[in-house]
Image: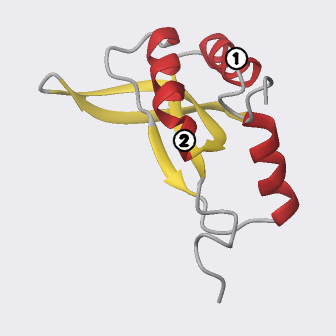
Amino acid sequence: MPSRRTSKSGNKIVVLVSCASRAEGRRIARSLVESRLSACVSMLGPAAESVYRWKGKVESAREFLLVIKSERRRFRVLAERVRQLHSYEVPEIIALPIVAGLPEYLAWIAKSVRNSSR
């Protein structure tokens, strides 16, 4: 079995971000891809209903989920960009490791988030 280092997937991540509106999701997605913080952002819709506890009360809201493909080394800057563009006081920004994937797709992620000056 290949080691984490040789699998090429160990540094790839999927980041989940929920947004209040489709427009907000599009704005965040475009900014992340244009700045090479993400290779691709998929927005799932129609809106889902989220039920959550906020400031001591159970609330619900319609939300759009962003599925962001990136690399672990870009997460800190990516999360900060999302916070700058997001309307929520505390936005959901959760990174999950990609443990396996089509090698060509993983290479495409790496190439897409590479700084253009390299």
Task: Mark 1 and mark 2 in contact? Answer it, CB < 8 Å.
Answer: no
Name the residue carrying label 1.
Answer: 26
Q: Is residue 83 visible?
A: yes
Q: Quadrant of residue 34?
A: top right
For badge 1, the amino acid type reads Arg
Q: Position of residue 105 (x, y in %)?
A: 83, 55
> Foreground mark, 1 or 2?
2
Badge 2 local density, few (<14 within 10 Å), some, or many (20+)?
Answer: few
Mark 1 to mark 2 CA distance (whole Å): 23 Å
Q: Quick one: 16 or 5, which is closer to the camera?
A: 5
Q: Position of residue 53 (x, y in %)?
A: 23, 32
Image point 60% across, 79% down: which residue? 3
Residue positioned most to the bottom: 1
Q: Quadrant of residue 59?
A: top left
Image point 73% across, 35% down: which residue? 113
Quarter holding the C terminus? top right
